[in-house]
Image (cartoon, rainbow, N blue to C red):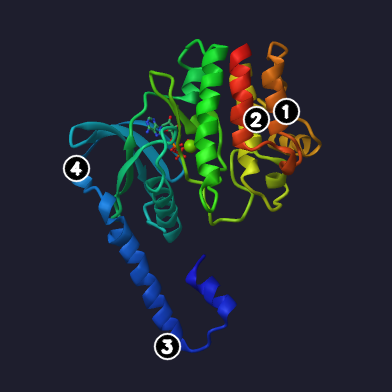
Amino acid sequence: MSLNASLGGLKIKDPEEIERLIKENNELKSQIAGGGASSSYQIPYDDLEVQDQIGGGGFSLVYRGFWKGTPVAIKKWFDPNHSDAMVQEFREEVMTLADLRHPNVLQFLGACMKPPHLAMVTEHMPFSLHHVLYQAGVDLDRKKLVGLAQDIARAFIYLHSRKPAIVHRDIKPGNFLVDRAWKVKVCDFGLASNSKAQAGAGTPQYMAPELWENKHYNEKVDVYAFGVMLNEMIAKEPPFSGVPLLEVRQGVLDGKRPDIPLSCPKVLSDIIKKCWDASSDARPSFVQILDMLKTAAASV
Ligand SMILES: Nc1ncnc2c1ncn2[C@@H]1O[C@H](COP(=O)(O)OP(=O)(O)OP(=O)(O)O)[C@@H](O)[C@H]1O
Ligand SMILES: [Mg+2]
């Protein structure tokens, strides 16, 4: 929220008071950008060796590189104007990930917080789940698939049990990274937040009905998206492939969901259907999903 907007609500008339608040706000901003709370994980940009690009879009690009000789991934934010909105997005993503510690959440290593070099440094992972499903030609058999799904459920038990809960809001194969031992880690906390209450963002094909309708939502939007992605992992086909977005929206609101392959074992299709229930209250928690996946693991 901009300072002006926040002042609007307060109806402060005294120009001196406004001046003082603006100064205070700017000081706070520069503290966060240049040091203060973040000093323990700041990395000087010169310590990084940026190499080839491996992903990204929008305001950021992801590169492979080295941090003092250690292979890492470097996510760089760029906007020629360094607009406040971009700097704020960068800061929120860094502050969210820096606070998380879980074997199935991408390991944050540090960040360059001083404009113009805004970059987040994390461990480097060899594949994304998107690569595994569509590019690498790897054989993702059912046992491995259920193993990956269990790891993902563990990550989300952790995220949703934070106080307040962290809602990721962008579950899709490109936002999960996989290593050579088939361990999976969630990444891209660009939309995750425990403060934003507005709906409407995310990747359309994975968006729950309440998001399409701009209604109040909670962590169950992640459960919905997980159901869509679990089905995608089995079908090896993107959800609503080739369907225009307006039709996706109307279809989802009318209760339509991606096709579940006929070959999908019932234990898994039951989980998928519960996860993408139109009613968010009826969707299971990730604790329940993990239990169901453990049962499924024994029979697939
Ligand atoms: N730590 C990492 N190790 C290896 N590859 C990574 C890493 N982080 C990101 N990537 C690659 O970069 C892609 C984009 O990363 P991320 O989702 O964090 O950025 P983004 O700006 O949100 O991009 P997008 O708009 O494509 O989602 C990932 O799908 C993955 O292929
Ligand atoms: Mg992403």
* Secondary structure category for the residue under label 2: helix
Q: Nearer the viewer, mark 3 or mark 1?
A: 1
Q: Amino acid at mark 1?
A: Lys
Residue 161 can be seen, yes or no: yes
Residue under circle 2? 227
Report x, y in % for residue 130: 50, 24
Residue 237 can be seen, yes or no: no
Residue under circle 3? 16
At horizontal 68% and vertical 33% (from top left) the residue drawn is 275
How far separated are the C-alphas under marks 1 and 4?
A: 48 Å
Residue under circle 4? 47
| Left or right of residue 276: residue 133 | left
Mark 3 crowdedness (10 Å alpha carbons): few <14, some 14-19, many ≥20: few
Label pair 4/2, CB-CB below 8 angstroms: no
- The front one of 220 and 117 is 220
Q: Amino acid at mark 2?
A: Gly
Residue 242 occupies quadrant: top right
